[in-house]
Amino acid sequence: MPQFPRLQRGLDLSSPGSLTFWELQQGEGGPPQPTGDWRPPQWNLVCEDGWKVPLEQMSHLLGWLLGCVLLGTGCDWFGRRPVFVASLVLATGLGVSEALAASFPALLALRLLHGAGGLAGFSLALYVARLELCDPPNRLVLSAAAGLFSVLGTLLLPGLALLAQDWRLLQGLSALVTGLLLLFWGFPALFPESPCWLLATGQPARARRILWHLAEAGGEDPEDSPEEESSLATATELDMLGAGSPQPQYHSILELWHTCVAWRDGLILGFSSLICGGIRASFLHSLTPREPAFYQPYFLGAGLEAVATLLLLLMGDRWGRCPVLLLGTLVMGLASLLLLAGTQYLPGWTVVSLSVLGLLASQAMSALSSLLAAEVLPTVIRGAGLGLVLGAGFLGQAAAPLADLHGRHGFFLHHVVFASFAVLALLCILLLPESQGHPLPASLQDADRLSLLHGGHPCRAPLDHLPLLPASHQLAGTLWDQEG
């Protein structure tokens, strides 16, 4: 009597947006007999083919990195809404293509393109547009709410996988969800173009129409409102701006290097994001040194991400962005160094406590680094700048599958490198400006002025120390003194 193959299923959820539901077939009596019904080809991902799983994870993370860098620049050149819509179209098409992949190399290439061309684009455009539509007191609240919704989707994903019972069906369902989001294309009022970006790039006429529409959608008539005079004055000012600069002016991320101190803020935040993404795998490895239960690291990471978001919501506006970021870096660095030096000598409960504390701090630092980068970088290059910061985080996350690809032989070196980086980041974060309560900088000059606002002191206060110089030279001299 022939023995039929046993069916094992597992869900790969180690990377963001990963919806690949692997179906593994192992048989003791040879390959399954043909039944006459066509089935899509499957492939083995265990034993000698186990290296394919970390390769897929690394490919998907590198796709997110490329998407953040390239489509972030697209957000600055074409607008937030066009990138959002185009990314949804690409994500839907590539998701369907993944469900129909006929070989593992084809799936590997599609996973790379799915992260680069779809998922990263609409996530980045949505993050930037949401932040630019918020007033300063509500930016952290709405960012935390979006993070909690993301955690909720992460927790619901395994249940959807159990209902689907087939990785191709699950991939098709994910493509269907992104396709439903295309309703934003048909209703621009649900996702309008950012007026902040339109004004910063010299398109006040379009900004006026969108602001007028938002006021009407809020139940107010700008013409009959009590603040009619101020509304008319604002409209007149926008018309004058439109007459003065008829052509939009776009900027490149390379112009950031010509600023005095804004480039330094972006570099420090990108370095912080790289550390958070890379050191997270070290804490997870300390929590589960042996072969863990299948869903244990997944649910543990999602739960700690929710706790980190709630802690940010409680402390971010009370203490400020930079003190919380400094505290998180200190906790993460100390936990990493203690685990590196005393894992063999510390009791088990201490190792678990330090790992949970370090993982919680790295989750909080990652979210706060992204928020702070979006608040201190200017509007004209906010998409590209934030894309580089997020891309650095995905580069750090890609180091963990790379270590798994070599059988974890270089995992100790991985831990040493990122623990050293955490100590160095502790000194760099002291140079960051505080962005809480400040409006978003529109131009490169505004970003430099914000970097001089340490402790909320007006940037024009030091100008009186140079009374014989013109205003522009006074500001240049002040920036020189601050840098020196």
Image: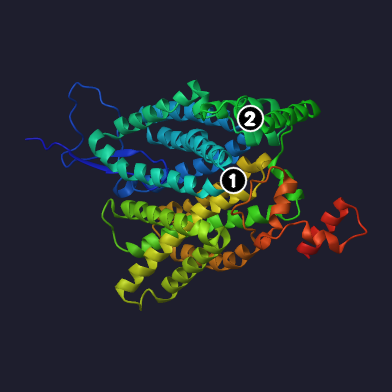
Is residue 463 shown left or right of residue 291? right
Q: Residue at x 33, y 55 (%)?
A: 300
Which residue is depicted at the point 35% across and 38% down?
Answer: 20
Q: Is residue 186 above or below residue 51?
A: above
Residue most toward the left? Answer: 1
Taking the spot 52% from the left edge, 56% from the top edge, the residue there is 317
What is the three-letter code of the residue carrying label 1? Leu
In the picture, measured across the screen, residue 65 lies left or right of residue 31, that is right
Image quarter of the N terminus: top left
Residue 467, x across and y down, in percent: 90, 60
Q: Position of residue 136 (x, y in %)?
A: 58, 47
Is the residue 412 above or below the residue 129 in the image?
A: below
Q: What secondary structure is marked by label 2?
A: helix
In-front residue for pair 413/278:
278
Q: Position of residue 367 (x, y in %)?
A: 49, 52
**Colour mode of the rendering:** rainbow
Residue 210 visible? The answer is yes
Mark 1 to mark 2: distance in Å?
16 Å
| Disc 2 target residue | 78
- Earlier in the chain: of badge 1 and badge 2, it is 2
Res. 165 visible in picture: no
| Number of the label disc, if any, that sits on residue 465 | none
Which residue is depicted at the point 34% across and 48% down? 50
Mark 1, other Cα within 10 Å: few <14 / some 14–19 / many ≥20:
many
Residue at numbered disc 1: 386
Q: Secondary structure at mark 1?
A: helix
Quadrant location of the C terminus in the rendered image? bottom right
Direction from residue 185 to residue 261 in the image, left or right:
right
Q: Quadrant of residue 29?
A: top left
